[in-house]
Image: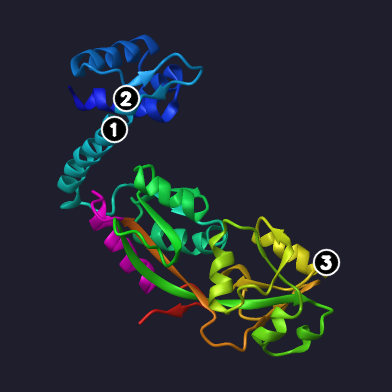
Protein backbone atom coordinates (compact mmCIF):
# COMPACT_ATOMS: atom_id res chain seq x y z
CA UNK A 1 0.00 0.00 0.00
CA UNK A 2 1.50 3.32 -1.11
CA UNK A 3 0.68 7.01 -0.67
CA UNK A 4 -0.04 7.17 -4.38
CA UNK A 5 -2.66 4.44 -4.10
CA UNK A 6 -4.26 6.34 -1.23
CA UNK A 7 -4.35 9.46 -3.41
CA UNK A 8 -6.13 7.45 -6.10
CA UNK A 9 -8.92 6.25 -3.82
CA UNK A 10 -9.42 9.73 -2.33
CA UNK A 11 -9.60 11.22 -5.83
CA UNK A 12 -12.17 8.65 -6.93
CA UNK A 13 -14.21 9.19 -3.77
CA UNK A 14 -14.29 12.95 -4.47
CA UNK A 15 -15.02 12.66 -8.20
CA UNK A 16 -17.43 9.72 -8.12
CA UNK A 17 -16.30 8.88 -11.66
CA UNK A 18 -13.26 6.95 -12.89
CA UNK A 19 -12.66 9.22 -15.88
CA UNK A 20 -12.75 12.45 -13.84
CA UNK A 21 -10.60 10.94 -11.09
CA UNK A 22 -8.03 9.69 -13.63
CA UNK A 23 -7.88 13.14 -15.20
CA UNK A 24 -7.33 14.73 -11.80
CA UNK A 25 -4.52 12.25 -11.09
CA UNK A 26 -2.99 12.77 -14.58
CA UNK A 27 -3.15 9.07 -15.44
CA UNK A 28 -5.26 6.94 -17.76
CA UNK A 29 -8.59 5.57 -16.61
CA UNK A 30 -7.40 2.00 -17.06
CA UNK A 31 -4.33 2.65 -14.90
CA UNK A 32 -6.47 4.16 -12.15
CA UNK A 33 -8.89 1.24 -12.25
CA UNK A 34 -6.06 -1.29 -12.13
CA UNK A 35 -4.31 0.42 -9.21
CA UNK A 36 -7.50 0.70 -7.16
CA UNK A 37 -8.40 -2.93 -7.83
CA UNK A 38 -4.86 -3.88 -6.77
CA UNK A 39 -5.34 -2.02 -3.48
CA UNK A 40 -8.73 -3.63 -2.90
CA UNK A 41 -7.17 -7.07 -3.46
CA UNK A 42 -4.36 -6.21 -1.03
CA UNK A 43 -6.85 -5.09 1.63
CA UNK A 44 -9.29 -7.88 0.93
CA UNK A 45 -12.18 -5.41 0.82
CA UNK A 46 -14.29 -3.71 -1.85
CA UNK A 47 -13.97 0.05 -1.42
CA UNK A 48 -16.27 1.23 -4.23
CA UNK A 49 -19.69 0.22 -5.48
CA UNK A 50 -19.33 0.27 -9.26
CA UNK A 51 -22.90 -0.88 -10.03
CA UNK A 52 -24.38 2.63 -9.98
CA UNK A 53 -24.07 5.43 -12.54
CA UNK A 54 -21.91 7.34 -10.06
CA UNK A 55 -19.20 5.36 -8.29
CA UNK A 56 -19.90 5.41 -4.54
CA UNK A 57 -18.04 4.25 -1.47
CA UNK A 58 -19.02 1.08 0.35
CA UNK A 59 -19.39 1.36 4.15
CA UNK A 60 -15.86 0.04 4.73
CA UNK A 61 -14.66 2.21 1.85
CA UNK A 62 -15.91 5.34 3.63
CA UNK A 63 -13.88 4.47 6.72
CA UNK A 64 -10.75 3.63 4.74
CA UNK A 65 -10.95 6.79 2.61
CA UNK A 66 -11.40 8.88 5.78
CA UNK A 67 -8.22 7.33 7.18
CA UNK A 68 -6.46 7.81 3.82
CA UNK A 69 -7.23 11.53 3.97
CA UNK A 70 -5.61 11.77 7.40
CA UNK A 71 -2.53 9.87 6.22
CA UNK A 72 -2.16 12.06 3.14
CA UNK A 73 -2.59 15.19 5.24
CA UNK A 74 0.12 14.03 7.63
CA UNK A 75 2.43 13.21 4.70
CA UNK A 76 1.84 16.69 3.33
CA UNK A 77 2.42 18.12 6.77
CA UNK A 78 5.83 16.42 6.99
CA UNK A 79 6.87 17.89 3.64
CA UNK A 80 5.62 21.34 4.51
CA UNK A 81 7.20 21.33 7.96
CA UNK A 82 10.56 20.83 6.28
CA UNK A 83 9.86 23.76 3.95
CA UNK A 84 8.57 26.07 6.68
CA UNK A 85 12.01 26.56 8.19
CA UNK A 86 13.34 28.32 5.10
CA UNK A 87 10.49 30.19 3.37
CA UNK A 88 7.06 30.11 5.06
CA UNK A 89 5.75 32.98 2.90
CA UNK A 90 6.89 31.55 -0.42
CA UNK A 91 4.09 29.14 -1.23
CA UNK A 92 0.55 28.75 -2.54
CA UNK A 93 -2.34 29.09 -0.09
CA UNK A 94 -5.90 28.02 -0.84
CA UNK A 95 -7.98 30.69 0.91
CA UNK A 96 -11.75 30.64 1.38
CA UNK A 97 -13.65 33.87 1.96
CA UNK A 98 -17.33 34.64 2.56
CA UNK A 99 -19.18 36.58 -0.20
CA UNK A 100 -20.15 39.46 2.09
CA UNK A 101 -16.47 40.13 2.77
CA UNK A 102 -14.49 39.06 -0.30
CA UNK A 103 -15.29 41.82 -2.83
CA UNK A 104 -14.75 44.56 -0.25
CA UNK A 105 -11.80 43.31 1.82
CA UNK A 106 -9.74 41.34 -0.68
CA UNK A 107 -8.60 44.31 -2.82
CA UNK A 108 -7.09 45.80 0.35
CA UNK A 109 -5.55 42.46 1.38
CA UNK A 110 -4.14 41.48 -2.00
CA UNK A 111 -2.45 44.83 -2.56
CA UNK A 112 -0.86 44.63 0.87
CA UNK A 113 0.30 41.04 0.62
CA UNK A 114 1.63 41.29 -2.93
CA UNK A 115 3.85 44.15 -1.86
CA UNK A 116 5.08 42.47 1.31
CA UNK A 117 5.24 38.85 0.14
CA UNK A 118 5.65 38.81 -3.65
CA UNK A 119 6.17 35.02 -3.69
CA UNK A 120 3.05 34.23 -1.69
CA UNK A 121 0.30 33.05 -4.03
CA UNK A 122 -3.27 33.17 -2.79
CA UNK A 123 -5.84 31.04 -4.63
CA UNK A 124 -9.21 32.45 -3.61
CA UNK A 125 -12.49 30.60 -3.24
CA UNK A 126 -15.60 32.63 -2.40
CA UNK A 127 -18.19 30.54 -0.54
CA UNK A 128 -20.61 30.77 2.35
CA UNK A 129 -19.37 29.82 5.82
CA UNK A 130 -20.64 26.19 5.93
CA UNK A 131 -18.86 25.40 2.66
CA UNK A 132 -15.62 27.07 3.78
CA UNK A 133 -15.76 25.05 6.99
CA UNK A 134 -16.38 21.82 5.08
CA UNK A 135 -13.46 22.46 2.73
CA UNK A 136 -11.17 23.30 5.64
CA UNK A 137 -12.09 19.92 7.12
CA UNK A 138 -11.42 17.96 3.94
CA UNK A 139 -8.21 19.81 3.10
CA UNK A 140 -9.45 21.57 -0.05
CA UNK A 141 -8.82 24.91 1.67
CA UNK A 142 -5.83 25.90 3.79
CA UNK A 143 -7.48 28.83 5.57
CA UNK A 144 -10.62 30.93 5.66
CA UNK A 145 -11.54 34.56 6.20
CA UNK A 146 -14.79 34.31 8.16
CA UNK A 147 -17.10 36.21 10.47
CA UNK A 148 -16.66 34.96 14.03
CA UNK A 149 -17.49 33.14 16.19
CA UNK A 150 -16.32 29.87 14.69
CA UNK A 151 -16.90 27.01 17.12
CA UNK A 152 -14.74 24.12 15.99
CA UNK A 153 -12.03 22.74 18.33
CA UNK A 154 -10.01 21.49 15.34
CA UNK A 155 -9.49 25.04 14.03
CA UNK A 156 -7.12 27.79 15.05
CA UNK A 157 -8.99 31.12 15.13
CA UNK A 158 -7.31 34.55 15.10
CA UNK A 159 -9.62 37.63 15.25
CA UNK A 160 -8.37 40.34 12.85
CA UNK A 161 -10.69 43.34 13.24
CA UNK A 162 -14.22 44.48 14.05
CA UNK A 163 -16.37 45.75 11.19
CA UNK A 164 -19.19 48.13 12.25
CA UNK A 165 -22.64 47.96 10.67
CA UNK A 166 -24.25 50.97 9.00
CA UNK A 167 -27.92 51.67 8.47
CA UNK A 168 -28.91 51.69 4.79
CA UNK A 169 -32.22 53.49 4.15
CA UNK A 170 -33.97 54.84 1.04
CA UNK A 171 -32.67 58.34 0.24
CA UNK A 172 -36.23 59.66 0.46
CA UNK A 173 -36.85 58.10 3.91
CA UNK A 174 -37.03 60.38 6.95
CA UNK A 175 -34.13 58.46 8.55
CA UNK A 176 -31.87 59.63 5.71
CA UNK A 177 -31.89 63.11 7.28
CA UNK A 178 -30.58 61.80 10.62
CA UNK A 179 -26.89 61.91 11.60
CA UNK A 180 -27.26 58.53 13.31
CA UNK A 181 -29.98 55.89 13.32
CA UNK A 182 -31.24 54.12 16.43
CA UNK A 183 -31.80 50.37 16.32
CA UNK A 184 -35.48 50.65 17.23
CA UNK A 185 -36.02 53.09 14.35
CA UNK A 186 -34.41 50.66 11.94
CA UNK A 187 -36.41 47.71 13.23
CA UNK A 188 -39.73 49.50 12.79
CA UNK A 189 -38.97 50.64 9.23
CA UNK A 190 -39.16 47.21 7.56
CA UNK A 191 -35.83 45.48 8.07
CA UNK A 192 -34.51 43.53 5.08
CA UNK A 193 -31.82 40.87 5.45
CA UNK A 194 -29.98 38.24 3.47
CA UNK A 195 -31.65 34.86 3.14
CA UNK A 196 -31.01 31.96 5.49
CA UNK A 197 -27.52 30.47 5.19
CA UNK A 198 -25.62 33.77 5.09
CA UNK A 199 -23.70 34.32 8.30
CA UNK A 200 -24.11 38.10 7.87
CA UNK A 201 -27.83 37.67 8.57
CA UNK A 202 -27.11 36.08 11.95
CA UNK A 203 -24.27 38.54 12.68
CA UNK A 204 -26.53 41.54 12.08
CA UNK A 205 -29.42 40.19 14.15
CA UNK A 206 -27.17 39.27 17.05
CA UNK A 207 -25.08 42.45 17.01
CA UNK A 208 -28.16 44.68 17.01
CA UNK A 209 -30.42 42.46 19.14
CA UNK A 210 -33.00 42.35 16.36
CA UNK A 211 -34.01 38.70 16.38
CA UNK A 212 -37.66 38.34 15.38
CA UNK A 213 -37.96 41.90 14.05
CA UNK A 214 -36.92 41.38 10.44
CA UNK A 215 -39.24 41.39 7.42
CA UNK A 216 -39.66 37.64 6.88
CA UNK A 217 -41.46 38.08 3.54
CA UNK A 218 -38.53 39.62 1.66
CA UNK A 219 -34.89 38.53 1.68
CA UNK A 220 -31.94 38.86 -0.71
CA UNK A 221 -29.20 36.56 -1.99
CA UNK A 222 -26.40 39.16 -1.95
CA UNK A 223 -25.46 42.50 -0.44
CA UNK A 224 -25.80 44.25 -3.79
CA UNK A 225 -29.33 42.87 -4.24
CA UNK A 226 -30.13 44.03 -0.72
CA UNK A 227 -28.84 47.52 -1.54
CA UNK A 228 -30.98 47.65 -4.69
CA UNK A 229 -34.05 46.59 -2.72
CA UNK A 230 -33.47 49.42 -0.24
CA UNK A 231 -33.06 51.85 -3.14
CA UNK A 232 -36.46 50.74 -4.48
CA UNK A 233 -38.05 51.62 -1.15
CA UNK A 234 -38.82 48.06 -0.06
CA UNK A 235 -37.32 48.58 3.39
CA UNK A 236 -34.10 49.29 5.26
CA UNK A 237 -31.10 47.13 6.08
CA UNK A 238 -27.71 46.82 7.75
CA UNK A 239 -24.54 47.04 5.65
CA UNK A 240 -21.01 46.16 6.87
CA UNK A 241 -18.84 49.25 6.65
CA UNK A 242 -16.38 47.76 4.13
CA UNK A 243 -19.26 47.18 1.72
CA UNK A 244 -20.41 50.78 2.08
CA UNK A 245 -17.38 52.68 0.86
CA UNK A 246 -17.25 54.76 4.05
CA UNK A 247 -18.79 55.58 7.40
CA UNK A 248 -21.61 57.67 5.96
CA UNK A 249 -22.77 58.96 2.61
CA UNK A 250 -25.66 59.15 0.19
CA UNK A 251 -25.97 57.46 -3.17
CA UNK A 252 -28.69 58.46 -5.59
CA UNK A 253 -31.21 56.09 -3.99
CA UNK A 254 -29.62 54.79 -0.75
CA UNK A 255 -28.45 56.74 2.28
CA UNK A 256 -25.89 55.19 4.64
CA UNK A 257 -25.86 56.36 8.24
CA UNK A 258 -23.93 55.26 11.36
CA UNK A 259 -25.86 53.42 14.03
CA UNK A 260 -26.43 55.08 17.37
CA UNK A 261 -25.66 51.77 19.06
CA UNK A 262 -21.94 51.47 19.88
CA UNK A 263 -20.55 48.00 19.33
CA UNK A 264 -22.98 47.00 16.56
CA UNK A 265 -20.38 45.17 14.49
CA UNK A 266 -19.13 41.79 13.33
CA UNK A 267 -15.68 40.33 13.98
CA UNK A 268 -13.62 39.07 11.05
CA UNK A 269 -10.98 36.39 11.65
CA UNK A 270 -8.52 34.10 9.93
CA UNK A 271 -9.04 30.39 10.64
CA UNK A 272 -7.04 27.28 9.75
CA UNK A 273 -6.63 23.67 10.90
CA UNK A 274 -4.58 23.35 14.07
CA UNK A 275 -2.55 20.52 12.54
CA UNK A 276 -2.10 22.29 9.23
CA UNK A 277 1.37 21.95 7.67
CA UNK A 278 1.05 25.67 6.84
CA UNK A 279 0.61 26.79 10.45
CA UNK A 280 3.73 29.00 10.41
CA UNK A 281 2.52 30.65 7.19
CA UNK A 282 -0.93 31.24 8.67
CA UNK A 283 0.46 32.73 11.87
CA UNK A 284 2.66 35.17 9.95
CA UNK A 285 -0.22 36.01 7.63
CA UNK A 286 -2.51 36.72 10.59
CA UNK A 287 0.08 39.05 12.14
CA UNK A 288 0.40 40.99 8.88
CA UNK A 289 -3.37 41.29 8.44
CA UNK A 290 -3.88 42.50 12.02
CA UNK A 291 -1.32 45.25 11.48
CA UNK A 292 -2.99 46.44 8.26
CA UNK A 293 -6.40 47.58 9.44
CA UNK A 294 -8.90 48.24 6.60
CA UNK A 295 -10.46 51.74 6.51
CA UNK A 296 -13.27 52.44 8.99
CA UNK A 297 -12.80 49.17 10.90
CA UNK A 298 -11.91 48.77 14.58
CA UNK A 299 -8.73 47.32 16.06
CA UNK A 300 -9.07 44.36 18.40
CA UNK A 301 -7.10 44.94 21.58
Q: Residue 149 at x, y = what percent?
A: 42, 67
Q: Say which of 18 and 78 sits in front.
A: 18
Residue segment shown in magenta:
273-292
| Residue at the spot of label 3 | 232
| Residue at the spot of label 1 | 63
Answer with the quarter of the image where residue 189 lies. Answer: bottom right
78 relative to 290 in the view: left or right: left
Vertical order, 253 against 124 (above or below): below
Which numbered disc, 3 or 1, marks the residue that appears first in the sequence?
A: 1
Q: Residue 116 at x, y = what percent?
A: 35, 61
Residue at point 36%, 27% (across, down): 11
Regarding residue 93, the answer to whether it shows in the image is no
Determine whether label 3 and label 1 are within 8 Å by CB. no
* Distance CA(mark 3)–CA(mark 1): 53 Å
Residue at point 39%, 70% (across, down): 160
Q: Say which of 158 and 1 sits in front.
A: 1
Which numbered disc, 3 or 2, marks the residue that appears first in the sequence?
A: 2
Regarding residue 33, the answer to whether it shows in the image is yes
Q: Is residue 231 magenta?
A: no
| Residue at the spot of label 2 | 9
Amino acid sequence: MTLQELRYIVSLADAGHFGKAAEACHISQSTLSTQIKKLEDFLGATLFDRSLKQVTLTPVGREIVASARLILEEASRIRELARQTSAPMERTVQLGVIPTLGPYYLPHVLTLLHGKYPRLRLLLREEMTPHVMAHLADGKLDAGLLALPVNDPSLEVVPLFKEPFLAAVPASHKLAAAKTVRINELASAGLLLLEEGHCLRDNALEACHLDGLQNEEISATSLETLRQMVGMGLGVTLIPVLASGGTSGTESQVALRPLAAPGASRTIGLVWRKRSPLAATMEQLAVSLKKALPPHTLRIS
